[in-house]
Image: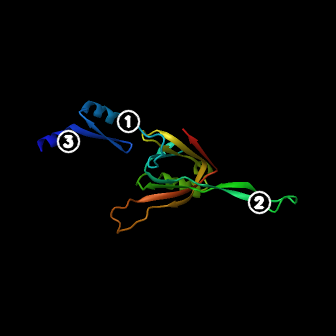
Amino acid sequence: MDQDITRRKAIQTLSVGGITVALSGCQGMLSEMIDMNTNTQDRHGPMRTGRFTVQINDTEIAGFQHVKIPGSSTERDEYRDGSDPDYEKKLWGKTTYDELELVRGFVPGDPVLREWKDDVIAGKVDSGRKKVTVSLMNEDGEAVIEWQFSNSWITEYEPPELDANAEENVGTEAVTVAFDKMVRTEV
């Protein structure tokens, strides 16, 4: 029995990429391989979406929990010349974009979204239109992809929903943002 326990202590396992390898008597090498494995990141897989920043007019605004990047849709037109066969040719037409949706934790004393909406309501064109930048970050906290929205303005503002029965819910404020142009760049 003692020999079996000693043998278990001497055999270490290392799991890399879903493959488990048994290492015996290689404590130093095992430590180096684990250190090397933790510093290496999979750059070939899809990006995780949980790390992002939001900037409004080049100022980072904290507390955003959810960002929905707008999708796009391109109209399809069909035409047929008189000498064409019995089918129509398809051409692309106008491209339209959905609106940007942002949700952030409600923080007393930080009315940046509400003040922006108030500027839009008051018709203040200069302060009502802003540049919004959403940056997707990698595991090291570096921006990898950015979406820039020019001449953005809030079309809808939703204050926090209050519920006396909700014990662990966090108050959030949400905005829907229209924009003139969206540009996606890889940083």
**Which of pointers 3 and 2 indicates the residue nearer the eye?**
3
Image coords of residue 17 (percent x, y) = 39, 42
Residue topped by disc 2: 78
Display coloring: rainbow
The residue at the far bottom in this view is 165
Q: In this view of the protein, can residue 57 be seen by the observer?
A: no
**Quarter of the rendering occupied by the N terminus:** top left
**Earlier residue among tags 1 and 3:** 3
Badge 2 crowding class, 10 Å Cα cut-off, few under 14, some 14 to 19, many 20 or more, is: few
Badge 3 crowding class, 10 Å Cα cut-off, few under 14, some 14 to 19, many 20 or more, is: few
**Earlier residue among tags 2 and 1:** 1
SS for dot 2 = strand
CA separation in Å, label 3 and label 2? 72 Å
SS for dot 1 = helix
Image coords of residue 64 (percent x, y) = 45, 51
Q: Residue at x 26, y 32 (%)?
A: 26
CA separation in Å, label 2 and label 1? 54 Å
Image coords of residue 157 (percent x, y) = 52, 60
Q: Residue at x 18, y 39 (%)?
A: 7
Residue topped by disc 3: 8
Residue type at mark 2: give it.
Glu
Badge 1 crowding class, 10 Å Cα cut-off, few under 14, some 14 to 19, many 20 or more, is: few
Using the image as rendered, state which of residue 56 and residue 68 is in the foreground.
68
Residue type at mark 3: give it.
Arg
State the image quarter where residue 83 is shown. bottom right
Residue topped by disc 1: 39
